[in-house]
Amino acid sequence: MSALSNKLQEFSIFEGIECHPAWHGLMTGIDTERMLRKIQVPYTYILRKGEHSTVENEEHYYVSFVLPDQTVKHQALVVMIGADGWYYENTKPGGPYQNLSLDPVLHLIMHCEEGQCIPLIKR
């Protein structure tokens, strides 16, 4: 992959995450807990900004979601750009992926069945 196409891929996946309907940007864990505790539907989730990364081609995010027992889980997620696509890492690495959305892998990150993930759209 050329440097230009690598840069376009990098921009696209990060932009794809931050333009996702469930994107809530920079939110504290406490504010996220308060918001999601009001939700009664398991696997309702938001995407939010994680810690600042000092590594080029890498961004940190959280997928915060409601579990079936109504507790809230904050799953840390690192998205990295490689020569052959993007990768994610939380409990174990996944990738490479060419699509420009987290949607196809969210159920793997949230440890649920495909189709159970429900985005909480920011109003």
Image (spheres, rainbow, N blue to C red):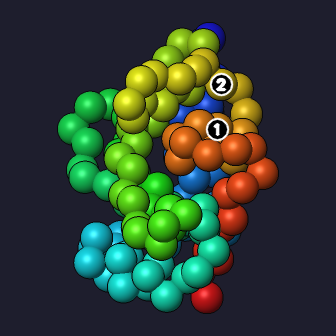
Mark 2, secondary structure of its residue: strand
Pick whichever of labels 1 and 2 is earlier in the sequence.
Answer: 2
- The residue shown at (64%, 38%) is 105
- Nearer the observer, 106 or 61: 106
User: In the rendered view, does 107 fall on the left or right side of 3?
Assistant: right
| Number of marks present in the image shown | 2
The amino acid sitting under disc 1 is Val
Q: Nearer the viewer, mark 1 or mark 2?
A: 1
Image location of residue 20, percent across then percent down: 64, 61
User: In the rendered view, does 111 fall on the left or right side of 26?
Assistant: right
Image location of residue 50, percent across then percent down: 32, 55
Image location of residue 78, percent across then percent down: 39, 38
Residue 33, compared with residue 97, is above or below; it is below
Q: Which residue is denoted by mark 1 in the rendering?
A: 105
Q: Which residue is denoted by mark 2 in the rendering?
A: 97
Binning the other alpha carbons within 10 Å of mark 1 as few (below 14), some (14 to 19) or many (20 upward) gives some
Q: Residue furthest front?
A: 69
Image location of residue 88, percent across then percent down: 48, 31
Q: Quadrant of the N terminus?
A: top right
Q: Is residue 81 among what the camera can see?
A: no
Q: Quadrant of residue 77?
A: top left
Mark 2 and mark 1 in contact (Cβ < 8 Å)? yes
Mark 1, secondary structure of its residue: helix
The amino acid sitting under disc 2 is Tyr
